[in-house]
């Protein structure tokens, strides 16, 4: 009798223990990360300021590396610590892989086509596969490196022309033109602009304005009930820039489609083949090109501009970089992409630039698909997650003397930017890591190394006196526009 009743007693006992364990490990809704007390209706919107990444960084010093902000009706979890970011991307990557799409960019259903914003789904996986496996593989990039070398040579020739004419060179503008033509040759086998064309300035303005409108705090994002009103006019302005950009791509695509003899082995050629095979639509192609060009032009040129800026205001650093280059290459020798591993100091300079001046201070906002427990705190479903990579790069508990430009810190540290080292995440991590990383990485290193190898540089007239001021007022994206001469 006792033998038969024992299982009957044991089963409910085990069930009770399991239930209690689930309750004890389930995150408590009252255990949100700490944060400033929200005001009625607006929450903490008033604390964001003109440079939210800096304002939020200051708040994190008081409330901790994981913090809650109430932005209107949206609960926002701010992560400012490599340790918490590591837990997020390694343990909860799928649950926190949703996207909070800024209302301003939802033009022509871009949010339903964009690889950056659509949910993790079969469509998203197909777009990622196309971008990473078919378009931006090392094999394809190796095959197209001659085009990029040619574009960098054109940049050197432009710099040489500036020297001969005795005029200053705007490194930001020149870097943008180079980045644009590097991308357009990889994608379309053609230049989109030239150094004496006004189109480059127009294109740069379009990209900059699209980034600015997408990143600016918007009441329509904080109060979804106000979306249709577009009270700040941000979506209206974004639409103007969006249609200008799409018109450029449509003209190129239509010319390619009309030319039945064209069989170019470039990115557009590959995409149009996928359209013929019904794996993509032309709308998919347009939106994919928009994502890749916005992500790959201004951000790359801004990194180059910041690197040159920091080197020029730290003359001993530029001397070290040029000395290493001269030890490896003869004076007139051309640097190839395959040579970059021979230049560890250039790698260190680029990493230090990414640390101090990430192209986007916050990673694109994530969205919680489910409730999760993160760093012992409760992150509710439908919360927005901001990862403040700018703050993480300036964290004194992680980096010694974080506000100083010290490339040497990376010479004895095995840290890369590929999403495995959470102290340095300029391209993000996990499923949503930027697919353009391999191309951007090559472009920045090759261009920077070639410029340092080809010329001696100094700040334009008066810039050394105003650097302290420039550093204080530099904008959230990119760096100050500096002029540099031979």
Image (cartoon, helix red, strand yellow):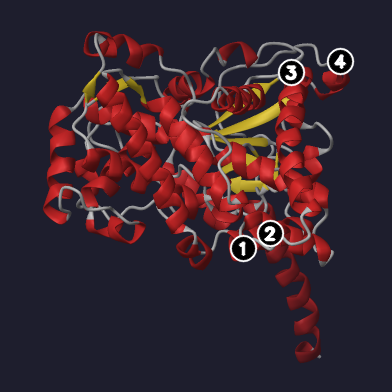
Which of pointers 4 and 3 indicates the residue nearer the eye? 3
Task: Judge from the rendering whether residue 197 lies leftward or rightward of residue 327; answer left or right.
Answer: right
Residue 139 visible in the picture: yes
The disc at residue 269 is 2
Q: Residues within 10 Å of mark 3 (few under 14, many from 20)?
A: some
Q: Disc 4 and disc 3: Cα gap in Å?
A: 14 Å
The disc at residue 229 is 4
Which residue occupies 18% across, 32% down?
A: 456
Task: Judge from the rendering whether residue 4 lies leftward or rightward of residue 405; answer left or right.
Answer: right
Q: Disc 3 and disc 2: Cα gap in Å?
A: 32 Å
| Residue 287: quadrant of the picture | top right
Seen in the picture, residue 444 relative to 306 is either above or below; the reply is below
Q: How crowded is mark 1: few (under 14 residues within 10 Å), some or many (20 or more)?
A: some
Which residue occupies 27% across, 14% down?
A: 467
Label 3 sits on a secondary structure element that is helix
* Residue marked by disc 3: 237
Label 2 sits on a secondary structure element that is helix
Which residue occupies 34% across, 37% down?
A: 157
The quarter of the rendered structure image containing the C terminus is: top left
Which of pointers 3 and 2 indicates the residue nearer the eye? 2
Residue 221 visible in the picture: no
Residue 251 appears at what percent x and percent y? 75, 40
Q: Disc 4 and disc 2: Cα gap in Å?
A: 40 Å
Tag 3 and tag 1, C-beta contact below 8 Å: no
Q: Disc 2 and disc 1: Cα gap in Å?
A: 6 Å
Residue 366 appears at what percent x and percent y? 64, 41
């Amino acid at each position: 009798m006792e033998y038969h009743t024992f299982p009957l007693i044991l089963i409910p006992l085990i069930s009770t223990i399991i239930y209690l364990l689930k309750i004890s490990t389930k995150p408590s809704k009252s255990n949100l990360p700490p944060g400033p007390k929200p005001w009625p209706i607006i929450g903490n919107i008033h604390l964001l300021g003109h440079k939210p990444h800096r304002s939020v960084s200051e708040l994190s010093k008081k409330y901790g590396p994981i913090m809650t902000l109430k932005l209107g009706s949206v609960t926002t979890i701010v992560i400012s610590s490599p340790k918490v970011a590591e837990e997020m991307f390694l343990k909860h990557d799928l649950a926190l892989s949703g996207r909070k799409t800024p209302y301003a960019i939802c033009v022509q259903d871009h949010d339903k086509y964009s690889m950056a914003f659509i949910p993790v789904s079969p469509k998203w996986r197909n777009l990622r596969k196309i971008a990473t496996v078919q378009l931006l593989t090392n094999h394809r990039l190796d095959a197209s490196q001659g085009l990029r070398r040619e574009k960098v040579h054109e940049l050197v020739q432009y710099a040489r022309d500036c020297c001969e004419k005795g005029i200053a060179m705007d490194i930001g503008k020149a870097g943008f033109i180079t980045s644009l033509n590097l991308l357009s040759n990889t994608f379309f086998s053609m230049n989109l602009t030239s150094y004496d064309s006004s189109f480059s300035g127009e294109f740069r303005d379009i990209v900059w304005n699209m980034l600015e409108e997408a990143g600016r705090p918007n009441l329509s994002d904080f109060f979804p009930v106000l979306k249709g009103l577009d009270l700040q006019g941000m979506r209206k302005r974004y639409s103007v820039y969006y249609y200008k950009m799409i018109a450029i791509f449509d003209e190129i695509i239509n010319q390619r489609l009309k030319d039945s003899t064209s069989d170019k082995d470039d990115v557009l050629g590959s995409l149009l083949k996928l359209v013929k095979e019904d794996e993509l639509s032309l709308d998919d192609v347009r939106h994919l090109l928009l994502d890749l060009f916005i992500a790959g032009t201004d951000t790359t040129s801004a990194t180059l501009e910041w690197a040159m800026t920091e080197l020029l205001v730290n003359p001993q650093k530029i001397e070290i970089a040029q000395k290493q280059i001269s030890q490896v290459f003869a004076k007139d020798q051309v640097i190839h992409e395959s040579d970059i591993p021979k230049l560890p100091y250039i790698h260190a300079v680029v990493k230090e630039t990414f640390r101090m001046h990430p192209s986007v201070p916050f990673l694109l906002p994530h969205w919680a698909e489910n409730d999760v427990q993160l760093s012992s705190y409760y992150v509710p479903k439908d919360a927005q997650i901001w990862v403040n990579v700018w703050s993480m790069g300036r964290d004194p508990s992680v980096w010694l003397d974080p506000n100083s430009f010290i490339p040497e810190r990376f010479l004895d540290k095995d840290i890369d930017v590929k999403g495995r080292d959470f102290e340095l995440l300029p391209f993000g991590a996990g499923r949503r890591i930027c697919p353009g990383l391999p191309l951007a990485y090559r472009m920045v290193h090759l261009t920077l190394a070639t410029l340092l190898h080809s010329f001696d540089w100094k700040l334009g007239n008066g810039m050394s006196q105003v650097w302290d001021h420039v550093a204080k007022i530099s904008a959230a994206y990119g760096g100050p526009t500096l002029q540099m001469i031979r």
